[in-house]
Amino acid sequence: MTNTRIRISALLLAISGLLTPHAAAFGAGKAPKTHELTFSGKATPEQYYVPVYTSFTVPEGIVKISVTQHLGSGEARPGNLDLGIFDERGAGFEGPGFRGWSGGARRSFEIGETEATPGYLAGRINPGRWTVIQMPTTAGRTTDWTLKITLTEGPRAKKLPAPSYAAPQLNDKPGWYRIAPHVHTVHSDGRLTPAEVIALGKASGLDGIVSTDHNTTSALLHWGEVQDLEFLVINGVEVTYGQGHWNIFGLDPHAWIDFRIHHNDTLRYRKVVAKARKAGRLLVATPPYNLDFLYDVTPMDGIEVWNSAWSPANERAVELWHTLLVGGNRKFAVASTDFHRGGNIASPHTVVRAEALSAEAVIDAIAAGRSYVARDTSAEIGMQVRNSATPVQHADIGDTLLRSGGMQAEFRSNTAGRLRLTDQQGWFSDTSIAPGTVVVPIPERSLWVRAELRAEDGSMIALTNPIYIQHPLTTQSLLPE
Protein backbone atom coordinates (compact mmCIF):
# COMPACT_ATOMS: atom_id res chain seq x y z
CA MET A 1 0.00 0.00 0.00
CA THR A 2 1.43 3.40 -1.02
CA ASN A 3 2.46 5.67 1.86
CA THR A 4 1.65 2.95 4.37
CA ARG A 5 3.58 2.56 7.59
CA ILE A 6 3.46 -0.91 9.12
CA ARG A 7 4.28 -1.58 12.75
CA ILE A 8 4.07 -5.14 13.97
CA SER A 9 4.62 -6.20 17.53
CA ALA A 10 4.01 -9.65 18.96
CA LEU A 11 3.46 -9.77 22.72
CA LEU A 12 2.52 -12.62 25.02
CA LEU A 13 0.02 -11.30 27.56
CA ALA A 14 -1.23 -12.74 30.85
CA ILE A 15 -4.49 -11.12 31.88
CA SER A 16 -5.27 -12.22 35.40
CA GLY A 17 -8.83 -12.51 36.60
CA LEU A 18 -10.42 -12.60 33.12
CA LEU A 19 -11.68 -16.01 32.01
CA THR A 20 -12.94 -16.81 28.51
CA PRO A 21 -14.77 -20.04 27.64
CA HIS A 22 -11.35 -21.55 26.94
CA ALA A 23 -9.59 -20.25 30.06
CA ALA A 24 -10.36 -23.24 32.26
CA ALA A 25 -7.92 -25.37 30.30
CA PHE A 26 -5.09 -23.17 31.53
CA GLY A 27 -5.99 -23.54 35.21
CA ALA A 28 -7.92 -21.37 37.60
CA GLY A 29 -6.79 -17.75 37.55
CA LYS A 30 -4.85 -18.18 34.32
CA ALA A 31 -5.88 -16.45 31.13
CA PRO A 32 -5.24 -18.08 27.76
CA LYS A 33 -2.09 -17.15 25.92
CA THR A 34 -2.57 -14.38 23.37
CA HIS A 35 -0.55 -12.87 20.54
CA GLU A 36 -0.96 -9.14 19.93
CA LEU A 37 -0.34 -7.62 16.49
CA THR A 38 -0.54 -3.95 15.52
CA PHE A 39 -0.66 -2.58 11.98
CA SER A 40 -1.07 1.03 10.90
CA GLY A 41 -1.25 2.97 7.67
CA LYS A 42 -2.92 5.76 5.76
CA ALA A 43 -5.80 5.66 3.28
CA THR A 44 -5.52 8.46 0.72
CA PRO A 45 -8.22 10.05 -1.48
CA GLU A 46 -6.87 8.04 -4.43
CA GLN A 47 -7.87 4.85 -2.62
CA TYR A 48 -11.58 5.66 -2.56
CA TYR A 49 -13.32 2.27 -2.85
CA VAL A 50 -9.97 0.57 -3.46
CA PRO A 51 -9.55 -2.24 -0.91
CA VAL A 52 -6.69 -2.01 1.58
CA TYR A 53 -5.42 -5.47 2.56
CA THR A 54 -3.46 -6.31 5.72
CA SER A 55 -2.22 -9.90 6.02
CA PHE A 56 -0.97 -11.60 9.17
CA THR A 57 0.11 -15.09 10.16
CA VAL A 58 -2.05 -17.25 12.39
CA PRO A 59 -0.01 -19.94 14.17
CA GLU A 60 -1.20 -23.37 15.28
CA GLY A 61 -3.45 -23.55 18.32
CA ILE A 62 -5.47 -20.35 17.82
CA VAL A 63 -9.17 -20.57 18.65
CA LYS A 64 -10.21 -16.90 18.43
CA ILE A 65 -9.26 -13.83 16.41
CA SER A 66 -10.20 -10.36 17.65
CA VAL A 67 -9.78 -7.26 15.47
CA THR A 68 -10.17 -3.62 16.53
CA GLN A 69 -9.95 -0.72 14.08
CA HIS A 70 -8.98 2.82 15.09
CA LEU A 71 -9.46 5.63 12.57
CA GLY A 72 -7.88 9.07 12.65
CA SER A 73 -4.93 10.52 14.51
CA GLY A 74 -5.77 14.17 14.80
CA GLU A 75 -8.16 14.51 11.86
CA ALA A 76 -11.26 16.45 12.85
CA ARG A 77 -13.40 14.20 10.65
CA PRO A 78 -11.64 10.97 9.68
CA GLY A 79 -13.12 9.08 6.78
CA ASN A 80 -14.75 5.67 7.02
CA LEU A 81 -13.06 2.38 6.20
CA ASP A 82 -15.42 -0.58 5.90
CA LEU A 83 -14.15 -3.72 7.61
CA GLY A 84 -14.01 -7.47 6.88
CA ILE A 85 -11.72 -10.50 6.91
CA PHE A 86 -10.59 -13.52 4.86
CA ASP A 87 -9.05 -16.70 6.23
CA GLU A 88 -6.06 -18.74 5.08
CA ARG A 89 -7.88 -19.93 1.94
CA GLY A 90 -7.26 -16.54 0.35
CA ALA A 91 -8.65 -13.06 -0.30
CA GLY A 92 -8.54 -13.22 -4.09
CA PHE A 93 -11.48 -12.45 -6.36
CA GLU A 94 -14.29 -14.94 -5.68
CA GLY A 95 -11.90 -16.78 -3.37
CA PRO A 96 -13.18 -19.23 -0.78
CA GLY A 97 -11.65 -17.49 2.22
CA PHE A 98 -14.42 -15.02 3.10
CA ARG A 99 -15.14 -15.06 6.85
CA GLY A 100 -17.16 -11.91 7.38
CA TRP A 101 -17.98 -8.30 6.68
CA SER A 102 -19.43 -5.51 8.80
CA GLY A 103 -18.91 -2.60 6.42
CA GLY A 104 -18.87 0.64 8.37
CA ALA A 105 -21.23 -0.64 11.07
CA ARG A 106 -18.51 -1.86 13.45
CA ARG A 107 -14.99 -0.98 14.49
CA SER A 108 -14.26 -4.36 16.06
CA PHE A 109 -15.19 -8.01 15.69
CA GLU A 110 -14.31 -11.48 16.92
CA ILE A 111 -14.30 -14.87 15.21
CA GLY A 112 -14.22 -18.02 17.31
CA GLU A 113 -14.84 -21.66 16.64
CA THR A 114 -18.38 -21.69 17.99
CA GLU A 115 -19.34 -18.00 18.07
CA ALA A 116 -18.64 -14.86 16.08
CA THR A 117 -19.69 -11.23 15.97
CA PRO A 118 -22.81 -10.80 13.78
CA GLY A 119 -21.71 -10.47 10.17
CA TYR A 120 -18.87 -12.95 10.66
CA LEU A 121 -18.65 -16.73 10.30
CA ALA A 122 -17.66 -18.89 13.25
CA GLY A 123 -15.60 -22.00 12.59
CA ARG A 124 -12.13 -23.47 12.73
CA ILE A 125 -9.29 -20.97 13.01
CA ASN A 126 -6.80 -22.68 10.74
CA PRO A 127 -3.14 -21.64 10.66
CA GLY A 128 -1.85 -19.63 7.73
CA ARG A 129 -2.06 -16.14 6.25
CA TRP A 130 -5.30 -14.36 7.13
CA THR A 131 -6.20 -10.97 5.67
CA VAL A 132 -8.17 -8.01 7.00
CA ILE A 133 -9.84 -5.93 4.29
CA GLN A 134 -10.58 -2.23 4.78
CA MET A 135 -12.55 -0.31 2.15
CA PRO A 136 -12.24 3.51 2.15
CA THR A 137 -15.77 4.80 1.52
CA THR A 138 -15.40 8.53 2.19
CA ALA A 139 -14.50 10.51 -0.93
CA GLY A 140 -11.70 13.05 -0.81
CA ARG A 141 -10.52 12.16 2.68
CA THR A 142 -7.12 11.05 3.98
CA THR A 143 -7.51 8.80 7.01
CA ASP A 144 -4.92 7.26 9.31
CA TRP A 145 -5.84 3.78 10.45
CA THR A 146 -4.63 1.28 13.03
CA LEU A 147 -5.56 -2.38 13.39
CA LYS A 148 -5.04 -4.18 16.67
CA ILE A 149 -5.34 -7.95 16.25
CA THR A 150 -5.42 -10.43 19.12
CA LEU A 151 -4.89 -14.14 18.50
CA THR A 152 -6.08 -16.30 21.40
CA GLU A 153 -4.80 -19.82 22.00
CA GLY A 154 -6.90 -22.57 23.55
CA PRO A 155 -8.26 -26.08 23.20
CA ARG A 156 -10.17 -26.72 20.00
CA ALA A 157 -13.91 -27.18 20.23
CA LYS A 158 -14.89 -30.84 19.99
CA LYS A 159 -17.95 -30.02 17.93
CA LEU A 160 -18.91 -27.00 15.85
CA PRO A 161 -22.50 -25.72 16.00
CA ALA A 162 -24.75 -26.67 13.09
CA PRO A 163 -26.43 -23.92 11.05
CA SER A 164 -30.08 -23.21 11.82
CA TYR A 165 -31.88 -22.26 8.61
CA ALA A 166 -35.24 -20.59 8.16
CA ALA A 167 -38.07 -22.97 7.31
CA PRO A 168 -38.53 -22.99 3.50
CA GLN A 169 -42.33 -23.42 3.65
CA LEU A 170 -44.94 -22.42 6.22
CA ASN A 171 -48.18 -23.39 4.46
CA ASP A 172 -49.51 -24.58 1.10
CA LYS A 173 -52.35 -22.06 0.82
CA PRO A 174 -52.58 -19.90 -2.33
CA GLY A 175 -53.10 -16.24 -1.57
CA TRP A 176 -51.80 -12.69 -1.56
CA TYR A 177 -48.88 -12.37 0.84
CA ARG A 178 -47.26 -9.17 2.05
CA ILE A 179 -43.47 -9.36 1.82
CA ALA A 180 -40.68 -6.89 2.65
CA PRO A 181 -37.97 -7.95 0.16
CA HIS A 182 -35.10 -5.78 1.46
CA VAL A 183 -34.36 -6.07 5.18
CA HIS A 184 -31.18 -5.65 7.25
CA THR A 185 -30.32 -6.92 10.72
CA VAL A 186 -27.47 -6.59 13.21
CA HIS A 187 -25.54 -8.91 10.90
CA SER A 188 -24.76 -5.81 8.80
CA ASP A 189 -25.80 -2.23 9.56
CA GLY A 190 -29.28 -2.92 10.92
CA ARG A 191 -30.19 -2.22 14.53
CA LEU A 192 -32.49 -5.19 15.21
CA THR A 193 -31.72 -8.83 15.83
CA PRO A 194 -33.42 -11.46 13.64
CA ALA A 195 -35.91 -12.15 16.44
CA GLU A 196 -36.75 -8.45 16.72
CA VAL A 197 -37.18 -8.16 12.94
CA ILE A 198 -39.66 -11.04 12.92
CA ALA A 199 -41.63 -9.55 15.81
CA LEU A 200 -41.79 -6.14 14.14
CA GLY A 201 -42.72 -7.65 10.78
CA LYS A 202 -45.63 -9.57 12.26
CA ALA A 203 -46.81 -6.56 14.23
CA SER A 204 -46.72 -4.48 11.02
CA GLY A 205 -48.95 -6.90 9.12
CA LEU A 206 -46.31 -8.58 6.98
CA ASP A 207 -46.23 -12.27 6.10
CA GLY A 208 -42.50 -12.43 5.49
CA ILE A 209 -39.24 -10.80 4.44
CA VAL A 210 -36.17 -11.37 2.33
CA SER A 211 -33.07 -11.20 4.52
CA THR A 212 -30.59 -8.98 2.62
CA ASP A 213 -27.68 -7.98 4.83
CA HIS A 214 -24.79 -6.21 3.11
CA ASN A 215 -22.15 -8.55 1.62
CA THR A 216 -22.56 -11.26 4.26
CA THR A 217 -24.80 -14.27 4.71
CA SER A 218 -24.10 -14.87 8.40
CA ALA A 219 -27.72 -14.15 9.37
CA LEU A 220 -28.92 -16.91 7.05
CA LEU A 221 -27.25 -19.46 9.32
CA HIS A 222 -29.26 -18.32 12.36
CA TRP A 223 -32.85 -17.50 11.30
CA GLY A 224 -34.01 -20.98 12.31
CA GLU A 225 -33.06 -20.26 15.91
CA VAL A 226 -35.88 -17.70 16.12
CA GLN A 227 -38.26 -19.25 13.60
CA ASP A 228 -41.90 -18.17 13.73
CA LEU A 229 -44.08 -20.60 11.79
CA GLU A 230 -46.39 -17.78 10.71
CA PHE A 231 -43.64 -15.57 9.27
CA LEU A 232 -41.58 -16.47 6.20
CA VAL A 233 -37.88 -15.62 5.93
CA ILE A 234 -36.31 -15.93 2.48
CA ASN A 235 -32.54 -16.14 2.10
CA GLY A 236 -30.84 -13.26 0.32
CA VAL A 237 -28.00 -10.74 0.36
CA GLU A 238 -27.41 -7.18 -0.78
CA VAL A 239 -24.28 -7.03 -2.94
CA THR A 240 -22.95 -3.63 -1.91
CA TYR A 241 -20.26 -1.49 -3.51
CA GLY A 242 -19.83 2.23 -4.13
CA GLN A 243 -21.07 1.99 -7.71
CA GLY A 244 -24.34 0.21 -7.11
CA HIS A 245 -26.26 -2.18 -4.88
CA TRP A 246 -28.24 -5.24 -5.95
CA ASN A 247 -30.16 -7.88 -4.06
CA ILE A 248 -30.19 -11.62 -4.60
CA PHE A 249 -33.37 -13.48 -3.63
CA GLY A 250 -33.29 -17.21 -2.84
CA LEU A 251 -29.57 -17.40 -2.11
CA ASP A 252 -27.73 -20.53 -0.97
CA PRO A 253 -26.93 -19.59 2.67
CA HIS A 254 -23.36 -20.84 2.28
CA ALA A 255 -22.63 -18.92 -0.92
CA TRP A 256 -20.56 -15.75 -0.93
CA ILE A 257 -20.95 -13.28 -3.79
CA ASP A 258 -17.91 -11.05 -4.28
CA PHE A 259 -18.85 -7.38 -4.16
CA ARG A 260 -15.47 -5.97 -5.24
CA ILE A 261 -16.54 -5.08 -8.77
CA HIS A 262 -15.81 -1.83 -10.58
CA HIS A 263 -18.63 -1.00 -12.97
CA ASN A 264 -16.18 -0.77 -15.88
CA ASP A 265 -14.85 -4.28 -15.21
CA THR A 266 -17.36 -6.02 -17.47
CA LEU A 267 -15.68 -9.42 -17.28
CA ARG A 268 -15.66 -9.51 -13.48
CA TYR A 269 -19.26 -8.25 -13.35
CA ARG A 270 -20.38 -11.03 -15.70
CA LYS A 271 -18.57 -13.65 -13.62
CA VAL A 272 -20.22 -12.45 -10.42
CA VAL A 273 -23.66 -12.32 -12.04
CA ALA A 274 -23.18 -15.87 -13.35
CA LYS A 275 -22.21 -17.10 -9.89
CA ALA A 276 -25.17 -15.25 -8.35
CA ARG A 277 -27.53 -17.01 -10.76
CA LYS A 278 -26.16 -20.41 -9.77
CA ALA A 279 -26.30 -19.65 -6.05
CA GLY A 280 -29.59 -17.70 -6.07
CA ARG A 281 -32.83 -17.19 -7.97
CA LEU A 282 -33.45 -13.50 -8.69
CA LEU A 283 -31.26 -10.41 -9.08
CA VAL A 284 -32.75 -7.00 -8.28
CA ALA A 285 -31.19 -3.55 -8.85
CA THR A 286 -31.74 -1.65 -5.63
CA PRO A 287 -32.24 1.28 -5.35
CA PRO A 288 -31.09 2.51 -8.77
CA TYR A 289 -31.26 6.24 -8.01
CA ASN A 290 -31.02 6.62 -4.23
CA LEU A 291 -27.47 5.43 -4.94
CA ASP A 292 -26.44 5.64 -8.58
CA PHE A 293 -26.49 2.18 -10.16
CA LEU A 294 -23.56 2.31 -12.58
CA TYR A 295 -23.59 -1.35 -13.57
CA ASP A 296 -25.35 -2.72 -16.63
CA VAL A 297 -28.94 -3.23 -15.52
CA THR A 298 -29.64 -5.76 -18.28
CA PRO A 299 -28.71 -8.87 -16.23
CA MET A 300 -31.04 -7.83 -13.41
CA ASP A 301 -34.37 -9.67 -13.23
CA GLY A 302 -36.15 -6.82 -11.51
CA ILE A 303 -35.98 -3.24 -10.28
CA GLU A 304 -36.66 -1.95 -6.79
CA VAL A 305 -38.81 0.96 -7.94
CA TRP A 306 -39.74 2.17 -4.46
CA ASN A 307 -37.25 2.35 -1.63
CA SER A 308 -38.29 3.84 1.73
CA ALA A 309 -40.39 7.05 1.67
CA TRP A 310 -41.66 8.18 -1.74
CA SER A 311 -39.11 10.52 -3.33
CA PRO A 312 -37.87 11.90 -6.67
CA ALA A 313 -35.34 9.04 -6.72
CA ASN A 314 -38.20 6.55 -6.63
CA GLU A 315 -39.96 8.45 -9.41
CA ARG A 316 -36.84 8.03 -11.54
CA ALA A 317 -36.69 4.33 -10.69
CA VAL A 318 -40.27 3.86 -11.91
CA GLU A 319 -39.35 5.72 -15.11
CA LEU A 320 -36.34 3.43 -15.62
CA TRP A 321 -38.47 0.33 -15.14
CA HIS A 322 -41.14 1.68 -17.48
CA THR A 323 -38.51 2.42 -20.14
CA LEU A 324 -37.24 -1.15 -19.87
CA LEU A 325 -40.78 -2.49 -20.30
CA VAL A 326 -41.33 -0.28 -23.34
CA GLY A 327 -38.11 -1.67 -24.81
CA GLY A 328 -39.41 -5.22 -24.50
CA ASN A 329 -37.53 -6.13 -21.31
CA ARG A 330 -39.89 -7.98 -19.01
CA LYS A 331 -38.57 -7.07 -15.58
CA PHE A 332 -40.63 -7.13 -12.40
CA ALA A 333 -40.97 -4.28 -9.92
CA VAL A 334 -40.69 -4.60 -6.15
CA ALA A 335 -40.74 -2.15 -3.25
CA SER A 336 -39.40 -2.20 0.28
CA THR A 337 -38.41 0.06 3.13
CA ASP A 338 -34.76 -1.02 2.90
CA PHE A 339 -35.26 -1.61 6.60
CA HIS A 340 -32.35 -0.90 8.95
CA ARG A 341 -33.70 0.36 12.26
CA GLY A 342 -36.86 1.71 13.92
CA GLY A 343 -39.95 2.76 12.05
CA ASN A 344 -42.36 0.85 9.88
CA ILE A 345 -40.81 -2.16 8.19
CA ALA A 346 -43.81 -2.37 5.84
CA SER A 347 -43.86 1.12 4.28
CA PRO A 348 -43.63 0.31 1.42
CA HIS A 349 -43.67 -3.43 0.69
CA THR A 350 -44.55 -5.93 -2.04
CA VAL A 351 -47.82 -7.90 -2.16
CA VAL A 352 -47.33 -11.24 -3.89
CA ARG A 353 -49.87 -13.71 -5.35
CA ALA A 354 -48.20 -17.01 -4.47
CA GLU A 355 -49.32 -20.63 -4.50
CA ALA A 356 -48.06 -21.08 -0.93
CA LEU A 357 -46.30 -19.22 1.83
CA SER A 358 -42.93 -20.69 0.91
CA ALA A 359 -39.65 -19.30 -0.32
CA GLU A 360 -39.99 -21.09 -3.65
CA ALA A 361 -43.59 -20.04 -4.27
CA VAL A 362 -43.02 -16.40 -3.31
CA ILE A 363 -39.90 -16.14 -5.46
CA ASP A 364 -41.72 -17.79 -8.38
CA ALA A 365 -44.52 -15.24 -8.03
CA ILE A 366 -42.14 -12.28 -7.85
CA ALA A 367 -40.28 -13.57 -10.92
CA ALA A 368 -43.55 -13.82 -12.86
CA GLY A 369 -44.62 -10.31 -11.84
CA ARG A 370 -47.61 -11.61 -9.91
CA SER A 371 -47.40 -8.76 -7.45
CA TYR A 372 -48.06 -5.12 -6.72
CA VAL A 373 -46.32 -2.68 -4.40
CA ALA A 374 -48.15 -0.79 -1.67
CA ARG A 375 -47.54 2.23 0.54
CA ASP A 376 -48.48 0.30 3.69
CA THR A 377 -50.43 -2.74 4.80
CA SER A 378 -53.72 -0.83 4.82
CA ALA A 379 -53.64 -0.41 1.02
CA GLU A 380 -55.28 -3.22 -0.94
CA ILE A 381 -55.73 -3.18 -4.70
CA GLY A 382 -56.32 -5.61 -7.54
CA MET A 383 -56.51 -5.55 -11.33
CA GLN A 384 -57.80 -7.93 -13.98
CA VAL A 385 -57.98 -7.64 -17.75
CA ARG A 386 -60.96 -9.22 -19.51
CA ASN A 387 -62.10 -9.77 -23.07
CA SER A 388 -65.33 -7.78 -23.38
CA ALA A 389 -67.12 -10.44 -25.44
CA THR A 390 -66.07 -13.31 -23.19
CA PRO A 391 -65.55 -11.75 -19.74
CA VAL A 392 -65.01 -15.15 -18.16
CA GLN A 393 -61.60 -15.04 -19.85
CA HIS A 394 -59.41 -12.85 -17.71
CA ALA A 395 -55.85 -12.33 -16.52
CA ASP A 396 -54.59 -11.18 -13.16
CA ILE A 397 -51.48 -9.12 -12.43
CA GLY A 398 -48.47 -10.82 -14.00
CA ASP A 399 -50.52 -13.08 -16.29
CA THR A 400 -50.95 -13.06 -20.09
CA LEU A 401 -54.32 -12.95 -21.91
CA LEU A 402 -55.02 -13.64 -25.59
CA ARG A 403 -56.91 -10.69 -27.07
CA SER A 404 -60.33 -11.49 -28.47
CA GLY A 405 -62.01 -8.28 -29.57
CA GLY A 406 -62.39 -5.43 -27.12
CA MET A 407 -60.71 -5.57 -23.73
CA GLN A 408 -61.21 -3.84 -20.42
CA ALA A 409 -59.29 -3.44 -17.18
CA GLU A 410 -61.08 -3.83 -13.88
CA PHE A 411 -59.24 -2.05 -11.09
CA ARG A 412 -60.37 -2.30 -7.50
CA SER A 413 -59.06 -0.47 -4.47
CA ASN A 414 -59.99 0.08 -0.86
CA THR A 415 -58.36 3.51 -1.06
CA ALA A 416 -59.34 6.66 -2.94
CA GLY A 417 -56.78 8.27 -5.21
CA ARG A 418 -55.84 9.12 -8.76
CA LEU A 419 -55.79 6.05 -10.99
CA ARG A 420 -53.53 6.07 -14.04
CA LEU A 421 -53.27 3.26 -16.59
CA THR A 422 -50.48 2.99 -19.11
CA ASP A 423 -49.20 0.69 -21.83
CA GLN A 424 -46.10 0.70 -24.04
CA GLN A 425 -47.25 3.89 -25.80
CA GLY A 426 -48.16 5.93 -22.74
CA TRP A 427 -50.99 6.85 -20.41
CA PHE A 428 -54.48 6.10 -21.71
CA SER A 429 -56.51 6.73 -18.54
CA ASP A 430 -56.08 9.22 -15.70
CA THR A 431 -58.98 9.73 -13.31
CA SER A 432 -59.81 10.22 -9.64
CA ILE A 433 -61.49 7.21 -8.05
CA ALA A 434 -63.30 6.40 -4.82
CA PRO A 435 -62.87 3.07 -3.04
CA GLY A 436 -64.46 0.32 -5.11
CA THR A 437 -64.11 -1.02 -8.67
CA VAL A 438 -63.43 0.94 -11.86
CA VAL A 439 -63.71 -0.45 -15.40
CA VAL A 440 -61.54 1.12 -18.11
CA PRO A 441 -61.45 0.17 -21.84
CA ILE A 442 -58.02 -0.92 -23.07
CA PRO A 443 -56.70 0.42 -26.40
CA GLU A 444 -56.34 -2.08 -29.23
CA ARG A 445 -52.63 -1.22 -29.42
CA SER A 446 -51.80 -2.41 -25.90
CA LEU A 447 -49.20 -5.15 -25.45
CA TRP A 448 -49.39 -4.79 -21.69
CA VAL A 449 -51.18 -2.69 -19.10
CA ARG A 450 -50.05 -1.55 -15.68
CA ALA A 451 -51.68 0.72 -13.08
CA GLU A 452 -50.59 3.37 -10.61
CA LEU A 453 -52.71 4.72 -7.77
CA ARG A 454 -51.44 8.04 -6.44
CA ALA A 455 -52.41 10.42 -3.67
CA GLU A 456 -53.47 13.99 -4.43
CA ASP A 457 -49.91 15.21 -3.76
CA GLY A 458 -48.60 12.85 -6.45
CA SER A 459 -47.00 10.36 -4.09
CA MET A 460 -47.53 6.67 -4.80
CA ILE A 461 -50.16 4.63 -2.99
CA ALA A 462 -49.78 1.45 -5.04
CA LEU A 463 -48.38 0.26 -8.36
CA THR A 464 -48.98 -2.98 -10.24
CA ASN A 465 -46.76 -5.11 -12.36
CA PRO A 466 -48.12 -5.44 -15.92
CA ILE A 467 -50.78 -7.72 -17.29
CA TYR A 468 -49.58 -8.87 -20.71
CA ILE A 469 -51.73 -9.06 -23.83
CA GLN A 470 -51.11 -11.42 -26.75
CA HIS A 471 -52.41 -10.40 -30.18
CA PRO A 472 -53.57 -13.44 -32.20
CA LEU A 473 -53.19 -12.06 -35.75
CA THR A 474 -49.63 -10.81 -35.40
CA THR A 475 -48.65 -13.01 -32.42
CA GLN A 476 -47.20 -9.76 -31.11
CA SER A 477 -46.84 -9.85 -27.36
CA LEU A 478 -44.40 -9.36 -24.56
CA LEU A 479 -43.92 -12.84 -23.18
CA PRO A 480 -41.37 -14.07 -20.65
CA GLU A 481 -37.82 -14.18 -21.94
Image (cartoon, rainbow, N blue to C red):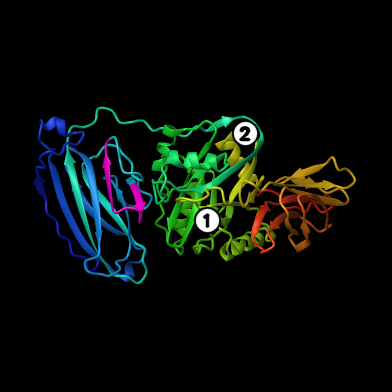
| Camera-nearest residue between 449 and 13 | 13
| Camera-nearest residue between 267 and 304 | 304
Three-letter amino acid code at the position of disc 1: Thr
Report if the CB atoms under discs 1 and 2 are less than 8 Å apart.
no
For residue 47, side relative to residue 273 (left or right): left
Measured in 3D between alpha carbons, the distance from the residue under mark 1 to the one under mark 2, in whole angstroms, is 26 Å
For residue 16, side relative to residue 231 (left or right): left
Residue under pointer 2? 356
Of labels 1 and 2, earlier in sequence is 1
For residue 278, side relative to residue 326 (left or right): left
Name the spot of residue 359 as percent of width and height, x first.
55, 37
Mark 2, Cα crowd under 10 Å, few <14 / some 14-19 / many 20+, is: some
| Local secondary structure at mark 1 | loop
Residue under pointer 1? 286
Name the spot of residue 92 as percent of width and height, x first.
33, 52
| Magenta residue span | 100-113
Three-letter amino acid code at the position of disc 2: Ala
Indicate which disc residue 106 carries: none
| Local secondary structure at mark 2 | loop
Q: Is residue 303 magenta?
A: no
Mark 1, Cα crowd under 10 Å, few <14 / some 14-19 / many 20+, is: many
* Residue 55 showing in the rendered view: yes
Name the spot of residue 80 as percent of width and height, x first.
33, 62
